[in-house]
Image (spheres, grey):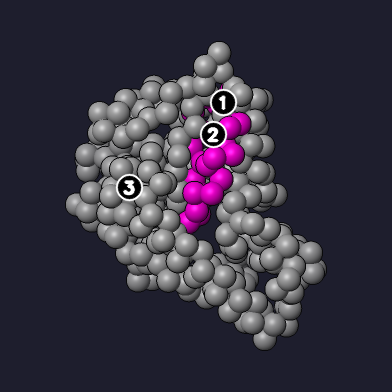
Amino acid sequence: MARLVSRGDFHTHSTHSDGLRSPAELVDLAASRGVHVLALTDHDTLDGLAEAEAAAARHPGFTLVPGVELSCDVPGTEVHILGYFIDRKRPELREQLDGFRRGRIDRARRIIEALDRLGAPIEWSRVQELAGEASIGRPHIAQALLEAGHIESFNEAFDRFIGRNGAAYAERPKLAPAEAIAMIRDAGGLAVFAHPSFTDDYPRVAGELADAGLFGLEAYYKGYEPELVGELAALAERLGLFALGGSDYHGIDREDERLPGEIPLPDAVTDAFLEAARARGCTVPDPAPG
């Protein structure tokens, strides 16, 4: 039985970070599936937005939401913050994101050195080829490990080697969550707590982020069971946050991958989010004419 497709999807990635589709291909795929409002939220970069906007203009009624995903430093766990409707022309924002990109390159080199010591060598040049012009991420390393025959799946790469508890894991410079929220708000955007269940003690963390100016949290995430969706929506309501959702689509052959729009996000929530953004003074793009 086919899964329902939501009109909105507020968490996707392209080849400009660790996705396998170009921004244009991503937009075309989403539109073909009946998604009408899509956020491109590449890790630490805004470089794919111009291409995505050009593609969105070819699909009448389609709205492209400019976004970004930031990884934040919390002792013992991770917090990812999604930023929407940010003004990418601000030079200070560009400078901060360029610094994060350099940090990803340094981290990737250290992971590759650790993999070599562990008897799972891969070539730095191959990781660069896989990343192309994108910001280098762990999925590029996972792909190189898969090609080299050291693992049998992407999930194994993260479980054994490059996940937070993996033998080759390496940290990189990150913002504190409150700093990421401030950075997004300073750029005219709204900050949302991504996939909260990935963060240890997320109810407490969500409360702290709400105090720091968080706008919402991702309750309607790919693969979330209805019980968890309900718990997260209730948590958002208690904290005065907006309950949003996304597929976190990368196009990678992983067991938990979902296509754009393949999430339990009610269409009314998509419309309410755009209205809430306008009420907050955000610049919300108009749908493509046609």
- Mark 1, residue position: 57
Name the quadrant containing residue 122.
Answer: bottom right
Q: Residue at x 52, y 21 (%)?
A: 288
Measured in 3D between alpha carbons, the distance from the residue under mark 2 to the one under mark 3, in whole angstroms, is 19 Å
Observer able to see residue 18 = yes
Image quadrant in which the N terminus is located: top right
Relative image position of residue 206 (x, y in whole percent): 29, 52
Label 3: element kind: loop
Name the side, left or right, on which 123 lies relative to 77: right
Q: Circle 2: is it few (<14), some (14-19), or many (20+) Cα within 10 Å?
A: many
Give the mark nearest the N terminus, 2 or 3.
2
Which residues make up the magenta segment? 33-55
Q: Is residue 48 magenta?
A: yes
Label 2: element kind: helix
Name the side, left or right, on which 190 lies relative to 164: left
Label 1: element kind: loop
Q: Is residue 176 magenta?
A: no
Name the side, left or right, on which 280 lies relative to 122: left
- Mark 3, residue position: 187
Amino acid type, callout 3: Ala
Amino acid type, callout 1: Ala
Front residue (pair 5, 103): 103
Q: Residue furthest top?
A: 290
Q: Residue furthest bottom?
A: 117
Name the quadrant containing residue 199.
Answer: bottom left
Question: Quick check: marks 2 and 3 in contact, CB under 8 Å?
Answer: no
